[in-house]
Every structure is written in structure tokens, then in C-alpha cells.
Amino acid sequence: MTFETKIDVRYPDCDSMGIVHHAVYPIWYEMARMDFFAKCGYSYEYTHARGIDPAMVHLELDYGAPVSYPASVSVRITPTLCEGKKLAFRYEVWTEGASKPNASASSLHIWVKDGKSYSLEQELPEMFAALRAGID
């Protein structure tokens, strides 16, 4: 399944030419991830209150066409892997009317609690099942 998050480009996100700085895209991907978790019924506040976090261990980015201010983008996130201790996502940034994404990325995360690897499947099976349903 693919989930979508709408984001308005802010002027401070841009360089002096009005183009979104490359460092902003990972922030957008994180916003889309937080929306994905919330749409599955488990907000950041839920996991944070339990001391667990999907720590990012790998991020791969591809930049295509620049995004300029002013604009709105859609960040499409697709969960590609959900196992007991890890999960992965694919992202695409789209501007309205574009024939292909402006940027794309993939990320790999491991569940951690108190700085140690954590099995979501064993410890929070209901949350694991909800996230897993996002893939199926």
C-alpha cells in the first residue's frame, strides 16, 4: 500500500535560488513515516511513551527535478519490509502535474528500546500486525 502526505514548501527550506535544499528531503520522509504510523493507529507519541523507536540505519536518496518555492509536494511512502526487528520504506516526492517523481529514497530501520535491538513482533504483536497490514 502507498500512503500520501501533503507538504507545503516553506521559504526557509530553500537556497538563495528558491530551490529546496537537499537536506530538507529526509525531513519530509520522516514526516511521511510519522503519518504512516499514525494512519496505522500507532502515533509517534504511542511508541515514544513505550521507549521504542524505529532507528534509521540506512538512507539512500536520488534527486531528479528540483522543487522550487512556492509549491506543494506529495510524499508517497510505501512500506517494503516489516519483520520483527526491522522495517523499510520507499519514498517519492511529487509536484502537481509532474510525469515522474522529483526525488525518491529508501530507508531501513531497526526497532530499538533503551539502545538495544527490539522485536516489535514479540513485544507489541498488535502494533506489528497493524504495520504489517500496510504492506499487504
Image (tube, helix red, strand yellow):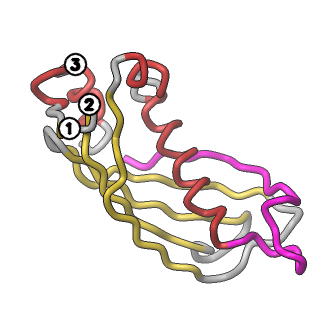
Left or right of 104: which side holds 134?
Answer: left
Residue on which disc 1 sits: 116
Query: Horizontal and vertical percent for residue 86?
Result: 21, 46
Q: CA distance from mark 2 to mark 1?
A: 5 Å
Does the residue at mark 2 contact the one at mark 1 (Cβ under 8 Å)?
A: yes
Q: Provide the secondary structure element on which disc 3 rests.
A: helix
Q: CA distance from mark 3 to mark 1?
A: 21 Å
Does the residue at mark 2 contact the one at mark 3 (Cβ under 8 Å)?
A: no
Is residue 3 highlighted in magenta? Answer: yes
Is residue 80 highlighted in magenta? Answer: no
Query: Horizontal and vertical percent for residue 130?
Result: 28, 27
Q: Say which residue appears at 43% left-offset and 49% top-offset.
A: 2
Q: Nearer the viewer, residue 45 or 32?
A: 45
Q: Say which residue appears at 25% left-offset and 46% top-offset.
A: 110
Q: Nearer the viewer, residue 136 or 7?
A: 7
Which stretch did the figure color magenta? 1-21
Q: Provide the secondary structure element on which disc 2 rests.
A: strand
Query: Horizontal and vertical percent for residue 40?
Result: 40, 28
Q: Residue furthest left?
A: 122
Quarter assignment of residue 108: bottom left
Circle 3 packing at 10 Å, graded few (<14), some (14-19), many (20+), is few
Q: Amino acid at mark 1?
A: Lys
Residue on which disc 2 sits: 113
Q: Nearer the viewer, residue 113 or 68?
A: 113
Above or below residue 86? Residue 80 is below
What's the mark number on residue 44? none
Count of numbered circles on the image: 3
Q: Amino acid at mark 3?
A: Glu
Residue on which disc 3 sits: 126
